[in-house]
Amino acid sequence: MSVESQPNSIVSLLQNLRDGSSTLLRQEVALAKAELSENAAEFGRNTLSLSIGALVAYAGLTVMLFGLAQLATVWLVRVGVGPDVAPWLAPSFVGLIVAFIGWVMFARAKRGLSRDALTPKRTIESLKTNTRWVQNKIQHSHESKT
Protein backbone atom coordinates (compact mmCIF):
# COMPACT_ATOMS: atom_id res chain seq x y z
CA MET A 1 0.00 0.00 0.00
CA SER A 2 1.49 3.35 -1.01
CA VAL A 3 1.77 6.37 1.27
CA GLU A 4 -0.62 8.45 -0.88
CA SER A 5 -3.43 5.87 -0.73
CA GLN A 6 -3.52 5.84 3.09
CA PRO A 7 -6.44 7.91 4.33
CA ASN A 8 -4.39 9.75 6.97
CA SER A 9 -1.17 10.15 5.04
CA ILE A 10 0.95 13.28 5.38
CA VAL A 11 0.06 14.34 1.83
CA SER A 12 -3.65 13.96 2.56
CA LEU A 13 -3.35 15.87 5.82
CA LEU A 14 -1.40 18.67 4.16
CA GLN A 15 -3.97 18.88 1.33
CA ASN A 16 -6.79 19.07 3.89
CA LEU A 17 -4.86 21.71 5.79
CA ARG A 18 -4.29 23.71 2.60
CA ASP A 19 -7.95 23.48 1.59
CA GLY A 20 -9.14 24.33 5.07
CA SER A 21 -6.72 27.25 5.28
CA SER A 22 -7.92 28.62 1.93
CA THR A 23 -11.55 28.42 3.00
CA LEU A 24 -10.68 29.97 6.34
CA LEU A 25 -8.80 32.82 4.67
CA ARG A 26 -11.77 33.56 2.39
CA GLN A 27 -14.09 33.58 5.39
CA GLU A 28 -11.74 35.87 7.32
CA VAL A 29 -11.62 38.31 4.40
CA ALA A 30 -15.43 38.29 4.22
CA LEU A 31 -15.63 38.89 7.98
CA ALA A 32 -13.13 41.74 7.76
CA LYS A 33 -15.11 43.36 4.93
CA ALA A 34 -18.36 43.09 6.88
CA GLU A 35 -16.81 44.45 10.06
CA LEU A 36 -15.09 47.33 8.27
CA SER A 37 -18.36 48.18 6.55
CA GLU A 38 -20.14 48.18 9.90
CA ASN A 39 -17.40 50.36 11.43
CA ALA A 40 -17.54 52.76 8.47
CA ALA A 41 -21.30 53.15 8.94
CA GLU A 42 -20.79 53.93 12.63
CA PHE A 43 -18.01 56.37 11.70
CA GLY A 44 -20.45 58.11 9.33
CA ARG A 45 -23.10 58.37 12.05
CA ASN A 46 -20.58 59.80 14.51
CA THR A 47 -19.32 62.27 11.91
CA LEU A 48 -22.89 63.39 11.28
CA SER A 49 -23.43 63.78 15.04
CA LEU A 50 -20.23 65.79 15.29
CA SER A 51 -21.35 68.11 12.52
CA ILE A 52 -24.84 68.54 13.92
CA GLY A 53 -23.43 69.14 17.40
CA ALA A 54 -21.13 71.84 16.06
CA LEU A 55 -23.99 73.51 14.16
CA VAL A 56 -26.31 73.36 17.16
CA ALA A 57 -23.60 74.86 19.37
CA TYR A 58 -23.02 77.64 16.84
CA ALA A 59 -26.73 78.37 16.41
CA GLY A 60 -27.24 78.27 20.15
CA LEU A 61 -24.32 80.57 20.68
CA THR A 62 -25.65 83.10 18.21
CA VAL A 63 -29.31 83.13 19.27
CA MET A 64 -28.77 82.84 22.97
CA LEU A 65 -26.05 85.46 23.06
CA PHE A 66 -28.45 88.03 21.67
CA GLY A 67 -31.49 87.16 23.79
CA LEU A 68 -29.88 86.18 27.05
CA ALA A 69 -27.31 88.93 26.87
CA GLN A 70 -30.08 91.50 26.79
CA LEU A 71 -31.85 89.86 29.72
CA ALA A 72 -28.64 89.48 31.71
CA THR A 73 -27.69 93.08 31.02
CA VAL A 74 -31.00 94.31 32.48
CA TRP A 75 -30.59 92.02 35.51
CA LEU A 76 -26.99 93.13 36.15
CA VAL A 77 -27.98 96.78 36.05
CA ARG A 78 -30.81 96.09 38.55
CA VAL A 79 -28.45 94.35 41.00
CA GLY A 80 -26.06 97.26 40.94
CA VAL A 81 -23.53 96.60 38.20
CA GLY A 82 -22.73 99.79 36.35
CA PRO A 83 -24.48 100.39 33.01
CA ASP A 84 -21.09 100.65 31.31
CA VAL A 85 -19.96 97.17 32.52
CA ALA A 86 -23.23 95.17 32.24
CA PRO A 87 -23.49 95.28 28.40
CA TRP A 88 -20.21 93.38 27.90
CA LEU A 89 -20.25 91.25 31.08
CA ALA A 90 -23.65 89.64 30.37
CA PRO A 91 -22.82 88.43 26.83
CA SER A 92 -19.51 87.07 28.10
CA PHE A 93 -21.24 84.85 30.67
CA VAL A 94 -23.89 83.68 28.21
CA GLY A 95 -21.29 82.96 25.54
CA LEU A 96 -19.20 80.95 28.00
CA ILE A 97 -22.14 78.72 28.97
CA VAL A 98 -23.20 78.05 25.35
CA ALA A 99 -19.61 77.38 24.28
CA PHE A 100 -19.26 74.85 27.12
CA ILE A 101 -22.38 72.99 25.93
CA GLY A 102 -20.97 72.89 22.39
CA TRP A 103 -17.62 71.63 23.68
CA VAL A 104 -19.34 68.78 25.56
CA MET A 105 -21.18 67.74 22.39
CA PHE A 106 -17.97 67.95 20.37
CA ALA A 107 -16.01 65.89 22.93
CA ARG A 108 -18.63 63.11 22.92
CA ALA A 109 -18.62 62.87 19.14
CA LYS A 110 -14.81 62.93 19.05
CA ARG A 111 -14.68 60.02 21.50
CA GLY A 112 -17.02 58.11 19.18
CA LEU A 113 -14.63 58.73 16.29
CA SER A 114 -11.58 57.40 18.11
CA ARG A 115 -9.16 55.15 16.25
CA ASP A 116 -10.09 52.24 18.49
CA ALA A 117 -13.66 52.30 17.19
CA LEU A 118 -12.43 51.49 13.67
CA THR A 119 -10.32 48.47 14.64
CA PRO A 120 -11.86 45.20 13.38
CA LYS A 121 -11.60 43.51 16.80
CA ARG A 122 -13.62 40.40 15.97
CA THR A 123 -11.56 39.73 12.86
CA ILE A 124 -8.29 40.09 14.75
CA GLU A 125 -9.49 37.75 17.49
CA SER A 126 -10.71 35.26 14.89
CA LEU A 127 -7.34 35.37 13.11
CA LYS A 128 -5.55 34.67 16.40
CA THR A 129 -7.86 31.73 17.09
CA ASN A 130 -7.34 30.37 13.58
CA THR A 131 -3.57 30.70 13.88
CA ARG A 132 -3.65 28.68 17.09
CA TRP A 133 -5.88 26.08 15.38
CA VAL A 134 -3.50 25.73 12.40
CA GLN A 135 -0.49 25.48 14.71
CA ASN A 136 -2.29 22.81 16.71
CA LYS A 137 -3.13 20.86 13.54
CA ILE A 138 0.46 21.05 12.34
CA GLN A 139 1.72 19.91 15.74
CA HIS A 140 -0.72 16.98 15.84
CA SER A 141 0.15 16.07 12.26
CA HIS A 142 3.83 16.06 13.19
CA GLU A 143 3.17 13.98 16.33
CA SER A 144 1.11 11.38 14.46
CA LYS A 145 3.95 11.05 11.94
CA THR A 146 6.45 10.08 14.64
Image: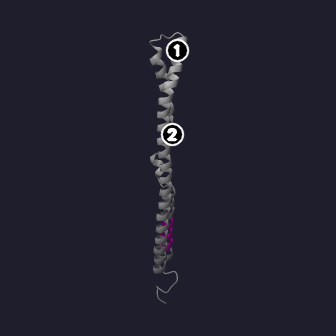
Compared to residue 97, the image places residue 75 above or below, namely: above
* Disc number lying in front (1 or 2): 1
At 51% across and 55% down in the image, what residue appears? 38
Q: What colouring style does the render use? A: one colour
The image's mark for residue 76 is 1
- Amino acid carrying label 2: it is Arg
Residue 61 is marked as: none
The magenta-colored residue range is 132-141
- Residue 141 lies, with reference to residue 62, above or below; the image says below
The prevailing secondary structure element of the residues shown in magenta is helix
Amino acid beneath label 1: Leu
Dot 1 alpha-carbon crowd within 10 angstroms: few under 14, some 14 to 19, many 20 or more? some
Res. 118 visible in picture: yes
In this view, the residue in front, 89 or 126, is 89
Q: Which residue is mark 2?
A: 108
Label 2: element kind: helix
For label 1, the SS is helix
Residue 30 magenta: no
The percent coordinates of residue 84 (x first, y second) are: 44, 12
Q: Are marks 1 and 2 in contact (CB under 8 Å)?
A: no
Q: Position of residue 87 (x, y in %)?
A: 46, 17
- Give the residue at x 46% y 64%: 29
In this rendering, the answer to whether 134 lies above or below 16 is above
Report the residue at 47% width, 70% height from top: 21
**Separation of residues labelled 1 and 2 (CA atoms):** 34 Å
**Residue 86 coordinates in the image, percent (x, y):** 48, 15
Magenta segment includes 136: yes
Whichever of callouts 1 and 2 sits on the residue coming sooner in the sequence is: 1
For label 2, the crowd category at 10 Å Cα-Cα, with few meaning under 14, some 14 to 19 and many 20 or more, is some
Residue name at image x 46 percent, y 42 percent: 51
